[in-house]
Image (tube, rainbow, N blue to C red):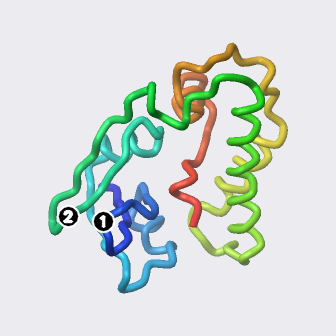
Amino acid sequence: MAYFIFHSDGTLHSIAATEADKNSLPITDNYVVKEVTDNDFNRVKKQTAGASVSGDTVTVTDFEHVEDPNIYDDEASLQRYHSNVIYKIDQFISAGNEDKSLYGAISSYKTLLEGFDTSTITYPMTKTWEEYCEDNSITYVSPLQIA
């Protein structure tokens, strides 16, 4: 089973693939933790769906590609996305999270993003970056897993 961690207002804060990953997140009493299916976890990890919670009910809703901010029209937009993820990773690393279960995967993902040649992709992308990674057997970490 996987986990979604929500703010008290029901909006998604982060995701965890395993209990070990969940236990390494800085979860406080202000968060609501819900167990979810691996299928729902993967949809949110790939950024093809979003999630919210109300009471005990978790709702996972597919994004419409037209409205999805994770579809890239050109190389510069994908580069901006990569820069934003690298910034989040840098914050994670500088916070001294070496003991976190995903530290190695997150560090490796940063190296991949920094060296990735975005000119090799055809634009506009009709999939999220995360879907592209899965389709091309690239190991990635969702920004929602970096906390």
Which residue is at 70% across, 47% downward?
Answer: 109
> Which part of the image, by quadrant, shows the C terminus?
bottom right
Question: Looking at the rendering, in which quadrant would you find the N terminus?
Answer: bottom left
Mark 1 falls on what kind of element? loop
Looking at the picture, how far across and down is residue 129, in whole percent? 59, 32
> As displayed, is residue 98 above or below residue 128?
below
Q: Position of residue 94 (x, y in %)?
A: 77, 72
Residue bearing mark 1 = 10
Name which residue type carries label 2. Ser
Q: Residue 54 carries which label?
A: 2
Image: 145 above or below 83: below
Depth order, front residue of 49/26: 49
Say which label, 1 or 2, has the lower sequence index.
1
Image height of 4 relative to 37, above or below:
below
State yes or no: discs 1 and 2 in contact (Cβ < 8 Å): yes
Name the residue rendered at 77%, 18% in the picture.
120
